[in-house]
Image (cartoon, rainbow, N blue to C red):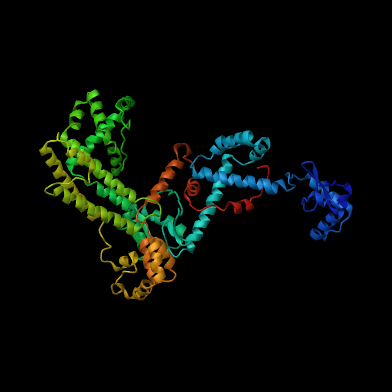
Amino acid sequence: IKKRKCDEDYIKNGFTIMEKNGIDHPQCVVCHTVLSNDALRPSRLERHLMKNHSALTKPREFFAAKLQNLKCMKLDTTGAFYQALVLAKVVEASYELSLLIAKAKKAHIIRETLVKPCLLKAADIVLGVESKKKLSKILLSDNSVKHRIDELAKDLKLQVVEEVLASFFFFFLQFINNGTVKEELLFSKELMTTSKSSDIMKTVSDFLLSWGKLVGVCTDGAPAMLGSCSGFVTLVKKNPAVTTTHCVIRRLAMAAKTLPDDLCDSLNLAIKIVNFEKSSALNTRLFDALCMDLGADHKTLVSHGGMWLSKGNMLSRFELKDEVEIFLKQQKKEELYHAFTDQTFQLSLAYLVDIFESLNNLRLKLQGNNAANVITHRDAIKAFTEKVQLWKRRTQAQMPNFSSFPIFSSFIENEGFQEVCREDVKNKIVFHLDCLADTFILYFPDNFSGNPIHKLVRNPFSIDVDSLPEVLQEQALEIKYDSSAKDNFENTSLKEFWIKYFPMYSEVGEEALRIILPFSSTYLCEKSFSSLVTLKTKQRNQLDVKNDLRCALSSFKPRISQLVKKMQHHPSH
């Protein structure tokens, strides 16, 4: 293929030369477009000039001046502006890296002290010196990261507010978006003085401005939230359309505290033994070595946290019972050793292991993002309450059945346990199950039974329409005999079904969404608080955390391309 050469006289047509891989290419000095080698012909160059710059009938001197300006410009190997392309990508990379740092909840300085050195080292080894030079231009200072995170958070906040305003109505942090229920951090703000309910109410009101679309609030048991006269919930309920709920996980924790004194003494003894093993580094090492010598699957006991149900995690190492017994004897803790080897204690402890495991399994069912609602949580609680009654009946039977308590069942079959001991622990179990059932009924009253609205929400195709209020009866009949709706009901979740048919059956759909949409637990807030604890450490106690928190928690994707376009790309920054 013939390789054409450039002629200096081509400047009269507005073209200069750009060399690529030893081959000449014509470049327009006006628009900087680079053409192929085959275009190095006067006719092709004139055609480009007439087609794209027909208004420029200028003399040779004009294009020569353009050429001098072009030589002063910083262009990349393609002939395009370095600022417009390379720096735009540099800024985009800066945003992306800042977002990753926020998502990882790391200190801003990590980008300058770790991320950038890693990028440059990898680029130098894998891609070469030129790539290293390009990556070195990414803005990675502490202030740059903070500035980027602030802009990303501002964009995320704007998206959330736009979607909330577009939603039919929303529950605090949960709203309808594109046919699904979206969970988002609406805002976080530090209370500068007191934390009274009035302060909380004012802060939320200043952000929301309008409470018209709010359908519910879920809170924990803090006095400022649940005060009967001036609590936050009381203030919110001045709007009669708002539903307020007490966190189902909090109520479960309080209900689980129902433990008779004798079983509570057994639990406290177990805690005392674990604390002894954790009381010194030497004790921990000795117990570790003992478990290794005996070939145990685990080498340490688990400490319990402040929450009541976390004691179940501590009891999960019941398999180390024999190792604990040997350890106490080696350490000459005679009092603890004799108490631990007591038959009544060991049977009681075995039962506690089983019952706490059941309670913790229930707690796990009540957790999760966007996975459950008031109805599903109610079903889980109702099923557990009925299980407790079943366990009680099995235990009280003439031939007791302890199959629901596998650890206890394996112990009770051991002939080494005296009959009087077995009977004593059996009575403890019956009494505890009886108290547990009563407490669950107290903390989780069944407000759904007999409520036709809830029956309609759960299954609109089996509802007795006459039981509904008159304003809903006609629409309830319409949806009941909508065959396509029935097919969708069987193949989609309850939330998605009612969101889809809300526009068609607005009155029935609104009643349904007001029941399904509200949170029944503060799990999302607790999860966010864990992120806050990770972000605001002792070393970062002056950090204004709200923007970092939003970037870390948001499921929205920031519109980085739009942010990049708004930036002025200066190589000096």
x 52%, y 53%: residue: 156
Whether residue 221 is visible, yes or no, is: no
Judge from the rendering whether residue 223 lies leftward or rightward of residue 352; answer left or right: right
**In the image, farthest residue toward the front:** 1
Tell me residue 273's x, y (percent): 25, 32
x 68%, y 37%: residue: 130
Which sits in the foreground, 142 or 8? Answer: 8
Name the quadrant containing residue 343. Answer: top left
**In the rendered view, would you say 524 is above or below 117?**
below
Which sits in the foreground, 551 or 294? Answer: 294
Tell me residue 125's x, y (percent): 62, 33
Which sits in the foreground, 190 or 461? Answer: 461
**In the rendered view, would you say 136 is above or below 233?**
above
Q: Quadrant where the C terminus lies?
A: top right
Numbered label tally: 0
Which sits in the foreground, 286 or 101? Answer: 286
Tell me residue 123's x, y (percent): 62, 36
Whether residue 530 is visible, yes or no, is: yes
Tell me residue 277's x, y (percent): 29, 29
Judge from the rendering whether residue 565 lies leftward or rightward of residue 162; answer left or right: right
Name the quadrant containing residue 470. Answer: bottom left
Judge from the rendering whether residue 111 lies leftward or rightward of residue 423; answer left or right: right
x 59%, y 37%: residue: 119
Judge from the rendering whether residue 390 lies leftward or rightward of residue 176; answer left or right: left
